[in-house]
Image (cartoon, grey):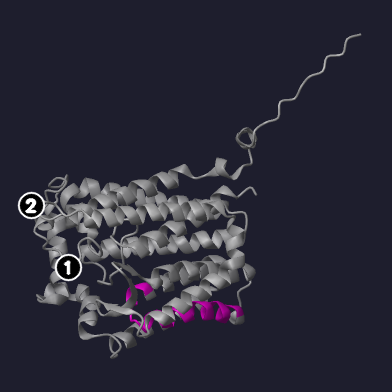
Amino acid sequence: MAVTVQQTVPRSPASTLRRNPSAAWRHLDLVLLGCVVAVSCLGALMVYSATRGPVEPYDISSLQRQALFVLIGFAVLAFTVAIDYRHFRDWALLLYTAACVLLAVVVSPVGSQSRGAQSWFQLGGFQFQPSEFAKLGLILAIANVASQFYGEIDRRRLAVLLGVAALPLVLIMLQPDLGTALVLSLITAGVLFIAGARAKHLLALLLVALLGATVLLNSSLLADYQKDRLTSFTHQDEGLTGVATYNTTQSKITIGAGGTFGEGLFQGSQTRLRNVPEQHTDFIFTAVGEQLGFVGSASLLALFSIISWRVWRTAQLARDEFGMLVCVGVLSLLMFQIFENVGMTMGIMPVTGIPLPFVSYGGSSTIALFAALGLVLNVHMRRFA
């Protein structure tokens, strides 16, 4: 009887990967990634609009740099996604320590001063801001420690967690940079809340924070103009004039000029005449409001809402406490910066210099945020690992 021998054709690695339903790449959150792409592209366009100038030849240098930052950001995101996020838990202490060392060095004579704060390293034509990466270092470190105490945070463990947050916070205030200090505080509060800190402890911390802010605003640590920027939004109806309220006044005029559908891309008179200081960085939302109107602004906020929802969803789907708390830290970072920046341009929040995620011009902020979202995508991809 004849015997038929069936030959088995070896599968290529790519074919095996396609057939493997548990492969991490199959669980990439395309909705989150797509929204990040859309917001970062809109951000680069708005940076160009705010810096091109009113007449030809238009200045494209800021656009070129922001586009480079976005490309580097995507490369960093890809690198972050490629490594199992549990390795970042092993490296959390190292990354946290490196961030704190950079914060310490930047307040030395090596650092550069800009806008009243010594928070930059001047690297040729670029500025490197360690505080943006300190946010990411704190997220990893406090998520790592809190995951070990999850649901069992007593006073001693709470003190340990606060100690983790205190070191970068103190170094940030030496610059001083109150805006970044607020971001670090909100990251800490968000992680502590989800990790199971007791309500009475959180309330006590809130009272201490309010007391500390009051003392700070009445101390000599901040310059008078910095205090005016932080407090002027509370009494705008008193007819104040000068530097303290100029930015906010021009910002509200610019957003209001956009109406429902805006004056058109590159057509905003306030933007073209550069009436809004720091429009391509802190006040970039005014360019959106004036040129794209309420519809464009609402669309941008809708994209931010989808990003926040997907990060929260990933936190719920995470396979372990560390992954969940990393997502919570990133969510706290994003939501506070969005609310503070947009509220600042509308005159309902203090002027703190916090950038609008993925939209404001800046390399350090853009690249650090891409790394943070890379961690979230990483947790989502490996939730079945």
Q: Which amino acid does label 2 sit on?
A: Val
| Residue found at the far top of this picture | 1
In depth, the one of 50 and 98 nearer the eye is 98
Q: Which amino acid does label 1 sit on?
A: Thr
| Residue found at the far front of this picture | 124
The answer to if 179 sits in the magenta stretch is yes
Q: Earlier in the sequence, mark 1 or mark 2?
A: 2
Quarter placement of the N terminus: top right
Which residue is at 60% across, 64% downward?
89
Residue 214: x %, y % from top left: 32, 85
Q: Give the range drawn in magenta.
A: 157-180
Residue 146: x %, y % from top left: 58, 70
| Residue found at the far right of this picture | 1
Say which element carries label 2: loop
Residue 255: x %, y % from top left: 16, 56
In depth, the one of 348 and 35 nearer the eye is 35
Q: In the image, which disc is placed on residue 263?
A: none
| Image position of 193 with respect to 45: above or below | below
Question: Where is mark 1, residue-wise?
Answer: 248
Question: Where is mark 2, residue-wise?
Answer: 55
Say which element carries label 1: helix
